[in-house]
Amino acid sequence: MAESVTLTREDAVARVTLNRPRLRNALDRGAIALLTQIFEYLSHDEALRLVVLSGAGSAFCGGADINYMRGSLDWSAEENFEDAQRLSGMFRGIDRCAVPVVGQIHGAALGAGSGLAAVCDIVVAAEDAMFGFTEVKLGIVPAVISPFVIAKIGETNARALFTTGERFDAYRAARIGLVHELVAPDALNGAVQKKIDEAMTAGPQAARVAKEIARTVGSLPAGEATVWTARKIAERRASEEGQEGLRAFLEKRKPSWQ
């Protein structure tokens, strides 16, 4: 379990790497637990500014581990329900991580792999990457990932792709909003580094609040959203970071966080 996901830190950037390359980084119960723990830990790291989620070897994530899936044949309905809740908790933890999460996608991102892409805030993918909500091919459904995926690609694309389980290329993934930027495979590391560099120019707390706004506003009633967002900008304007950013702009210098 300790080797199925690795965590490294470079200053204010954390790199979380799925590390089961021989199995195309397929998720099993240990990897799910470790991802949950890691993102819970990172979300409470006040010095952190960005997380990069990637996969070792030839694929980002090929879905669920076959032995893990085989084991579910012997579980009761209640045991399967509890397992699904643990999986949902992993996706929710990544989705709600306090800092932006960049998904670095190459090779296959199938089933749960496409779900992981959906919970990343920024997704940069190699042009030859392959996606798919392939669960129906096994007689099951993409239920646990559906709240996160539909929030990204919308109901119409989910209806088309969930029901067939067809694989689709990175260009279609970009058209439907699952991927934000496509690059040549050999340019993937450089493109992700550019996202890191951009993130370092943003106010650290402002970036956290900006992610919270993006995640929250769509679920608020219009009247409540107006008040809530006004309160957010008022708090940021009055904050030390907000005032430093404005002063730096007016004085034509870099803010202190750069």
Image (cartoon, helix red, strand yellow):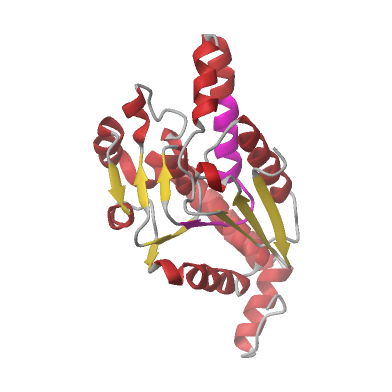
Q: In the displayed structure, does residue 24 sit left or right of residue 36?
A: left
Residue 126, image x, y percentages: 40, 62
Work out whether 232 lies above or below 143: below
Q: Is residue 78 above or below residue 253?
A: above
Compared with residue 74, is residue 118 higher up or lower down, i.e. above or below?
below
What is the x, y in percent for residue 161? 28, 38
Q: Quadrant of residue 115?
A: top left
Q: In this view of the protein, can residue 221 be seen by the observer?
A: no
Q: 149 or 98, which is in the foreground?
A: 149
Taking the spot 49% from the left edge, 29% from the top edge, the residue there is: 66
Residue at the image point whose x is 25% and y is 33% from the top: 164
Q: Residue 212 or 88: which is nearer the viewer? A: 88
Residue at image location 53% in from the left, 50% down from the top: 227
Work out which quarter of the rendered image holds the C terminus and state it: bottom right
- Magenta span of residues: 85-105
Rendered-image quadrant of the N terminus? top right
Q: Nearer the viewer, residue 233 or 71?
A: 71
Image x and y of residue 72, in percent: 52, 18
Q: How many marks?
A: 0
Residue lying furthest front in this view?
A: 22
Q: Is residue 95 magenta?
A: yes
- Is residue 187 in the magenta section? no
182 shown above or below 28: below
